[in-house]
Amino acid sequence: MAVTYKIIDSFGTLSRNEKSGWKKELNLVSWNDGEQKLDIREWSEDHSKMSKGITLTKEEAVALKKALNEINLN
């Protein structure tokens, strides 16, 4: 069974792989017509190919945001 996906919204590029040209992006994605989830992974320029990544439910994204706010990155 092939994996299907629809990028619902794009929130930005986190980085770009200079060698491949792929971009690590934060998107809202529906996988296999399922619930929309926040998704972080690298995508080819035309979004036809992707790397392994991470998907987060709304609750997981809220927990991650809270954890990141508590970290001093300076």
Image (cartoon, rainbow, N blue to C red):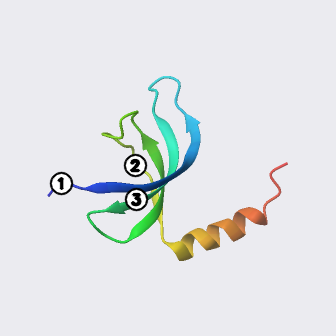
- Residue denoted by label 1: 2
Element class at badge 1: loop
Q: Position of residue 40 (x, y in %)?
A: 50, 53
Q: Name the quarter where the N terminus is drawn.
A: bottom left
Q: Are marks 1 and 3 in contact (CB under 8 Å)?
A: no
Q: Are marks 2 and 3 in contact (CB under 8 Å)?
A: no
Nearer to me, 8 or 58: 8
Q: At 80% from the left edge and 51% from the top edge, which residue is drawn?
A: 73
Judge depth for marks 2 and 3 and give the one in front: 3
> What amino acid type should be assigned to the residue bearing mark 3?
Val
Q: Badge 2 local density, few (<14 within 10 Å), some, or many (20+)? A: few
Name the residue carrying label 3.
29
Instruction: Give SS at disc 3.
Output: strand
Residue depicted at x 36% and y 40%: 47
Q: Which mark is residue 52?
A: 2
- Percent position of residue 60, x then y: 55, 72
